[in-house]
Amino acid sequence: MQLTSSLMIVVSMLWMTGISPATCGTNLVSCRLWAEPQSPGLSMNGNIIIGGIFSIHNYIRLEQHNYTTQPLQLQCSGSIDFRELHFARAMEFAIHEINNRTDLLPGYTLGYAIHDSCGAVLMAIKVAFKLANGVEPVFNVSDSCSKSGTAAVPAVVGESGSTPSMSMARILGLFGIPQVSHFATCACLSDKREYPAFFRTIPSDHHQAAALARMVKYFGWTWIGAVRSDSDYGNNGMASFLKAAQEEGICVEYSEAYYRTQPRSKLEKVANIIRRSTARVIVAFLAAGDMRFLLEELARQPLPPLQWIGSETWISHPEFLRFNMCAGAVGFGVPQSVIPGLREFLLDLTPAQALKSPWLTEFWERSFSCSLKGQVGTSAGVRECDGSEDIRALQNPYTDTSQLRISNMVYKATYAIAHAIHGVICNETQCDRTITLSPLQILNQLKKLNFTTKNGYRVTFDSRGDPVAVYELINWQFKKDGTLDFMTVGHYDSSKPRGQEFSIGRAISWMGEQAEVPVSLCTKSCPLGTRKAVQKGKPICCYDCIPCAEGEISNKTDSLDCVHCPPEFWPNERRDSCLPKPVEFLSWDDTLSIILTVFSVAGATVALSVAAVFYKHRTSPIVRANNSELSFLLLFSLTLCFLCSLTFIGQPSQWSCMLRHTAFGITFVLCISCVLGKTIVVLMAFRATLPGSNVMKWFGPPQQRLSVLAFTLIQVLICILWLTISPPFPFRNFKHYKERIILECRLGSAVGFWAVLGYIGFLAFLCFVLAFLARKLPDNFNEAKFITFSMLIFCAVWITFIPAYVSSPGKFTVAVEIFAILASSFGLIICIFAPKCFIIVFRPEKNTKKQLMGKEPSKAL
């Protein structure tokens, strides 16, 4: 009969395993396949037989197949794994305990058939078909598969490894036989479409990978190495971890895979990569067998101190405590537990009982280096067991019950199947022996289970067949006697809110018995005031630390970017914080302000002193001859000019900004108007001496007052328009200096400012021209030459002021303006009034009408 292509693949695998397919057609699901009988390592009859599969040995003996003759039966090889034997006997213990209970399956006796998968896919498939077939070594050649008198086991406990479990789950799932694993953690097994009948009591690697990544991030390790088993367990687990690590910003220097059956050259390559790496933290997602080979290889040559991060497969394995190089290792393992009575059960073993099982026989002979059967082995010096062997004196993974982590997972898996069977055939009081038990019924019951084991642990499965992920953080610490031991230092509970799953309860001993957390960074953390710049062609964890640019800060280590300080702030020297910018203005306590204030007050004092001298000698010829009314008004305006410079000192405000420019503009126009009036008077006075001239009647005292008032009112009008349309206002200048703020008065309307200044300049220029024309008028009465000098100084000062004002920085802008006001004011008072005061005070003999009316002509300029 022809087979489909998919069935041919299955048949090929079956042929390699030594299984002969029954002639039931191409529908593999509807019939059972028969395998040559393989005796279970541990077995017991009962009303219901539960299957068990454990990796008692680590290798399978393979032969070259020619596909022309039926291959020999598969056989396991290698030494026995005491830890796996411990797990298998934990299942035995659980079944014996269940059989002794009256509240669980009353009247029923559970049996078991526990097989060895050798940790190999081929043997796991063979055992899966064996358990699906039944336990009778009779091949039924009937046309109907349903006529077979052998019932399949209703459920299976195992396997320990993920890859064999996947192969088993595919086979058992075809028949709806539930499989409850105690140690297969691959996240791929949570896919119910591919593994519909798979359950487990140990959490999925999806949770473990996330927990490991979070722990690595918690301790600040961003540069790690990674090594994994080249199997479904290692590859899937490491893929989940690397994905979670990438999300946490962790970089991986290398990621290597190894499987114990690969050539030794591959193992040496992985070991050399680990030795040469710069990462001081290594995450090992390895099965126990692969880890053993790797550690033995690393122990051959000196190894730099490494902080090992382990997966649950080996981190709680007592066999590895002999490797002191792993001292300080941390990793997540299932919680330790207590199973009352288990230790006594394990130790209740005599040579006679050991002979009933090939596994127990091998265990006894290897533990005590003797031969139970009285036959000396091939190795010289092997004695015959004489009965003096004391199993209680043994210290190995079989007898170790100090942790009972995975053992409890086996215990829970066995109880889960028992409770599921109880839910199918029993009610609250009794069990119905007439009910035909089917695996599908047990499968449905497992999905709904929620109970607590005898030793107090809750058992339930989610929609993916997984339990709630609860881990203990295990740390390898030295005891007082110098030996390594497991110490629980923290917990991880996936049922808690995000961010609260991981907690540490006690101090961790790191590699080399350090108390401080080891450092594993590609680049040391960038300090405050710098940012990270990724090095080209390297992972993001390898970077250069670049100082923040001007005006930027970084206030945390390893900052990706620097941030700009707000406009009113500036970085400190370390560029790790923003400090308020100093506000700069011409304050009263500034040295420059004090100097300018002294000159301003001195100038005003001089003007008032001159006014006092003129007033005292108001009847003298020199005062009367120089238009005393305009002179007093000029001295008053000069006093205001000196004092208005004080409005430029101090912190600018709305009123001071408006006052300083308008007061300056108006007082200077008043001052220049008086000088202009005096100049015109000089011209008109000498014009009046000409025959028939009556010009003085057109420019007498009233006209002089009106001219001064008119000129000043024009400036007042300009200032009013300026203040109305766009007045000056206080302004915080951030642009002139980056590191400080200039508090200044903005002009508001630049047109208004330059109109005020231009009008002053126009009057000064007009006054200068008129005074220049009158400079050669006769007699000592003529003061036009002094006015010419004063206007020349005034114009020179203000012409120089314009570029100096525009280019002066900060508070010096105001200082330049004050200096221009004082310089021009001093120029006026010195040039116009100093000569007269000198004559009045020091040369009174010249203060006569005759002297003033002398005919000696004035010298030209």
Image (cartoon, rainbow, N blue to C red):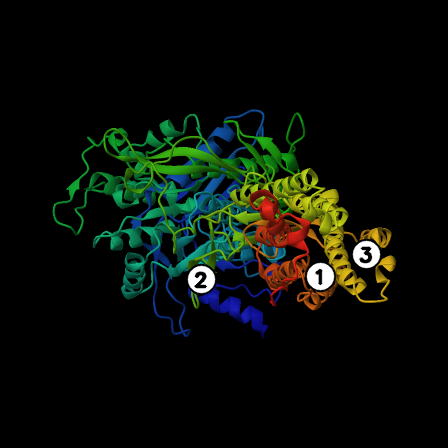
Closer to us: mark 2 or mark 1?
A: 1
Q: Residue furthest left?
A: 381
The C terminus sits in image quarter: bottom right
Could you tell me which secondary element the residue under label 1 belongs to?
Answer: helix
The answer to whether residue 128 of the structure is visible from this angle is: no
The answer to whether residue 277 of the structure is visible from this angle is: yes
Sequence-wise, the earlier of marks 3 and 1 is 3
Please tell me which residue lies in front, 111 or 160.
160
> Residue 46: where, in percent of width, then height?
50, 37
> Residue 857: where, in percent of width, then height?
64, 64
Alpha-carbon span between mark 3 and mark 2: 78 Å
Please tell me which residue lies in front, 442 or 514.
514
> Residue 222: where, in percent of width, then height?
43, 52
Q: Badge 2 local density, few (<14 within 10 Å), some, or many (20+)?
A: some
Whether residue 602 is situated above or below residue 387 in the rendered picture: below
Q: Which mark is residue 539?
A: 2
Could you tell me which secondary element the residue under label 3 belongs to?
Answer: helix
Q: Amino acid at mark 1?
A: Ala
Q: Residue at x 41, y 68 (%)?
A: 70
Image position of 547 (left or right of 632)? left
Q: Amino acid at mark 3?
A: Phe
Q: Disc 3 designates what residue?
A: 711
Q: Residue at x 39, y 59 (%)?
A: 253
Could you tell me which secondary element the residue under label 2 belongs to?
Answer: loop
Q: Disc 1 designates what residue?
A: 764
Image position of 651 (left or right of 102)? right
The N terminus sits in image quarter: bottom right
Please tell me which residue lies in front, 114 or 608.
608
Alpha-carbon span between mark 3 and mark 1: 12 Å
Q: Amino acid at mark 2?
A: Pro
